[in-house]
């Protein structure tokens, strides 16, 4: 038997401990989302908590873990008699892998038995296995959205509904839901974030003593797991007993009306959408009061609940990071705090401590005055110092023109304010470079990869996917999961006489089975190649360019794409953001992007070809979409013909940034070389047919002028290919 690391032995992480315990006390809180960098014991502490949950009594032989004292009347294995045999087992810890299918999550009809044996057999999924236990989803942000929806629906309702393939099943599914994620790998949509009850941000401690203690305990555990667990057995037993007492107490905790109004005022003050935040905060405050041994909810309980339930509900923009201003929280609480004579007085300045109502050895994972700080990992405010901050803050010092005036200094010249003493400009850019603020993002026209792909499910280009509309049938490559009944019947019909059919039913063989071929949408790899040279800083152009790329990043976020960012300026090109699912990281890098220097366009294209080559080997099913943002000028480096030839055939678009009354059309020439359409920067926003027709006419007139100049024989093929791409 594998020995789990003791929950009480985890150093720090007080907020995470408290959030997990509140859910263990009251599953109505709605689960925990743990956000944090890699290597911060997220998985360790979740597995440790499962070992502290009280054992559960189940009906023997029931695949849905029914409670003998109150069996589920809709249990597919029921009905269960009152005197049915029972057994006791530990609370289950079920892990949902990122690659799990919908059948594995909710269960499904056993199609092969149904067709070959005529038996209507339902196979339970992981939701049934997790009933009355813990369901742990590592890297929940990498799970497909429709699976996250199913998961959160079941967690909120306490019931799993299965309506598919002629199966109509419902069964109880009450579990403690814990999801972990690394924000660097991509965010969850705000709609899905809102469905998690509590959220905790986890960071590794920067205190050398605390880090040393973490390593010391882990080495001791790895050397002797059983012995290490034995040394913490007393603390673990006290924790399990305290959780059990709090579970019994929570149903009797009173939420006074003054505290309910306080919760409503806090949620309204932070302008959270909907009323789920109010409900979750109320449940968490009640659970916190039960955990603290109180019979009535106090203002302290409301504060602790709000700290955990509101940060992830304040995101207004997909690029916003979750967070909560605790000074504002304290101000709202104090302004709506009416003394309640029924509130129990706190035994100490920070609530029941080690000598609290639950015994001298009761652990206190929420001590705000302890050495670990507010979250047990970093002192208060450390997250602000670790975060590079909003890059837009650096832009407030830049002139509002976001570029030199027509009669001002040349774009490639030094910054107006000159270099700082350390060789950098005040905004952090190198001499001759500037950081220009981005404009407001907007809704852009959709760009899609032509053809039919087979990549990861998303919302951009057509693809064969597990979900979508049925477009055909095929022989199953493995276990039958998505049966195509008409095709199966058609395959079996010609063989009924030779199989000896005498009755009304068809005789089905394994070779007759067919599965559905479905068509939906896939996510693509959107690789941005952005011109950041000095010429882009003129006439507020870089402000518009950054707004356009931010808009395209927002579009990629909504369509579930991976993104990468290459910039070229000065001596060469730089891969600013390797391909990732974290669109937020791309937005942050773009806002900090300085401009200046010459324009090595060929270097940018060459770097893009190399990145796409590596990504094709790494993930061959994900099709790329190349977005080149440039005015087409190349003032440094080699000729673009060679790198453009390497990228020929790659789907994409050239965003033409050229402005002014006189235009050279160099970006359109680049689009012809690449064989992709071009879109003017000022026409990138989603518009009507008139904008598209105007742009296409402009491109065709430009192609005709070049055909006349070069000769119809040399340019005709290029122009025809170009028009096809458009």
Image (tube, rainbow, N blue to C red):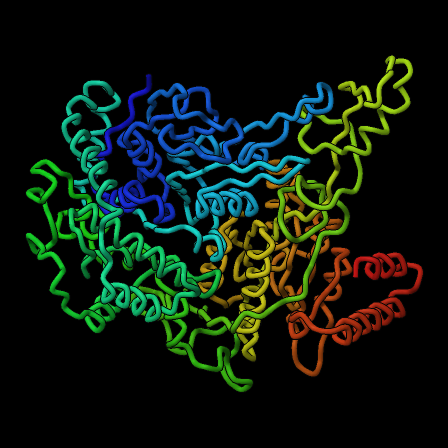
Q: How many marks?
A: 0
Residue shown at the point (54%, 72%) measured from the top left: 542
Which residue sits furthest bottom?
407
Which residue sits furthest front?
82
Report the front residue among 691 and 283.
Answer: 283
Q: Dividing the image into 4 quarters, which one contains the N terminus? A: top left
Which image quadrant for residue 675?
bottom right
Q: Image check: 478 left or right of 583?
A: right
Q: Image check: 342 left or right of 501?
A: left
Report the front residue among 693 and 415.
Answer: 693
Q: Position of residue 716 (x, y in %)?
A: 90, 60
Q: Dividing the image into 4 quarters, which one contains the C terminus? A: bottom right
Residue shown at the point (93%, 63%) measured from the top left: 712
Is residue 321 at least partly visible in the picture? no
Q: Position of residue 589 (x, y in %)?
A: 46, 59
Image position of 420 with respect to 405: above or below: above
Q: Position of residue 375 (x, y in %)?
A: 24, 50
Is residue 435 at least partly visible in the picture? yes
Image position of 507 with respect to 214: above or below: above
Q: Image check: 444 left or right of 229?
A: right
Q: Image check: 561 left or right of 690?
A: left
Report the front residue among 190 and 588.
Answer: 190
Which residue sits furthest right?
713
Residue shown at the point (87%, 12%) measured from the top left: 500
Report the front residue among 723 and 272.
Answer: 272
Q: Position of residue 174 (x, y in %)?
A: 41, 39
């Amino acid at each position: 038997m594998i020995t789990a690391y003791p929950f009480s032995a985890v150093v720090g992480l007080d907020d995470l401990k408290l959030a997990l315990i509140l859910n263990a006390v009251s599953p109505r809180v709605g689960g925990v989302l743990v956000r944090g960098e890699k290597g911060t014991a997220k998985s360790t502490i979740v597995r440790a908590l499962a070992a502290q949950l009280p054992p559960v009594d189940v009906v023997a032989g029931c695949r849905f873990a029914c409670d003998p004292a109150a069996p589920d009347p809709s249990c597919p294995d029921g009905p269960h008699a009152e005197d049915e045999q029972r057994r006791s087992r530990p609370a289950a810890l079920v892990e949902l892998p990122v690659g799990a299918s919908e059948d594995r999550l909710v269960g499904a009809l056993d199609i092969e038995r149904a067709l070959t044996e005529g038996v209507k057999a339902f196979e339970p999924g992981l939701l049934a296995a997790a009933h009355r236990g813990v369901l742990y989803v590592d890297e929940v942000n990498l799970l497909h959205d429709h699976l996250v929806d199913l998961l959160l629906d079941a967690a909120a309702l306490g019931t799993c509904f299965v309506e598919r393939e002629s199966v109509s099943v419902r069964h109880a599914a009450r579990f403690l839901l814990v999801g972990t994620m690394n924000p660097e790998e991509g965010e969850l949509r705000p709609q899905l974030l809102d469905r998690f009850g509590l959220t905790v941000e986890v960071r590794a401690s920067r205190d050398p003593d605390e880090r040393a203690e973490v390593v010391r305990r882990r080495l001791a555990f790895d050397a002797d797991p059983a012995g290490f667990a034995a040394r913490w057995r007393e603390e673990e037993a006290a924790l399990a007993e305290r959780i059990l007492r709090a579970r019994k107490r929570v149903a009797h905790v009173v939420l006074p009306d003054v505290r309910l109004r306080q919760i409503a005022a806090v949620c309204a003050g932070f302008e959270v959408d909907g009323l789920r935040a109010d409900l979750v905060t109320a449940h968490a405050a009640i659970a916190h009061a039960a955990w603290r041994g109180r019979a009535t909810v106090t203002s302290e309980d409301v504060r602790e609940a709000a700290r955990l339930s509101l940060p992830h509900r304040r995101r207004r923009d997909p690029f916003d990071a979750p967070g909560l201003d605790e000074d504002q929280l304290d101000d709202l609480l104090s302004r709506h705090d009416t003394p309640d004579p029924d509130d129990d007085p706190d035994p100490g300045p920070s609530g029941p401590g080690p000598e609290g109502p639950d015994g001298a050895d009761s652990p206190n994972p929420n001590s705000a005055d302890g050495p670990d700080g507010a979250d047990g990992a970093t002192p208060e405010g450390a997250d602000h110092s670790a975060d590079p901050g909003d890059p837009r803050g650096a832009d407030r010092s830049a002139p509002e023109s976001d570029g030199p005036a027509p009669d001002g200094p040349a774009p490639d010249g030094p910054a107006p304010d000159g270099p700082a003493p350390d060789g950098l400009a005040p905004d952090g850019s190198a001499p001759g470079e500037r950081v220009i603020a981005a404009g407001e993002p907007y809704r852009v026209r959709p760009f899609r990869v032509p053809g039919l792909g087979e990549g990861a499910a998303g919302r951009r280009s057509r693809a064969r996917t597990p979900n979508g509309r049925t477009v055909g049938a095929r022989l199953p490559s493995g276990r039958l999961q998505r049966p195509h009944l008409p095709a199966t019947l058609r395959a079996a019909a010609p063989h009924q006489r030779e199989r000896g059919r005498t009755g009304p039913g068809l005789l089905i063989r394994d070779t007759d089975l067919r599965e559905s071929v479905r068509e939906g949408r896939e996510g693509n790899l959107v690789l941005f190649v952005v011109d950041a040279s000095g010429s882009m800083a003129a006439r507020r152009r870089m402000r518009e360019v950054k707004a356009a790329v931010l808009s395209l990043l927002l579009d990629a976020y909504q369509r579930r794409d991976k993104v990468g960012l290459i910039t070229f300026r000065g001596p060469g090109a730089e891969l600013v953001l390797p391909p990732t699912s974290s669109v937020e990281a791309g937005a942050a890098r773009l806002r900090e992007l300085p401009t200046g220097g010459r324009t090595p366009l060929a270097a940018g294209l060459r770097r893009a070809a190399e990145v796409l080559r590596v990504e094709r080997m790494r993930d061959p099913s994900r099709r790329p979409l190349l977005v080149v943002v440039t005015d087409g000028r190349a003032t440094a480096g080699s000729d673009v013909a060679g790198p453009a030839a390497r990228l020929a055939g790659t789907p994409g678009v050239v965003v033409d940034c050229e402005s002014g009354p006189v235009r050279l059309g160099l970006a359109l020439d680049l689009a012809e070389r690449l064989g992709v359409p071009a879109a003017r920067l000022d026409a990138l926003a989603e518009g009507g047919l008139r904008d598209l027709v105007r742009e296409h006419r402009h491109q065709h007139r430009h192609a005709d002028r070049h055909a006349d100049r070069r000769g119809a024989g040399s340019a005709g093929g290029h122009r025809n290919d170009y028009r096809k791409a458009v």
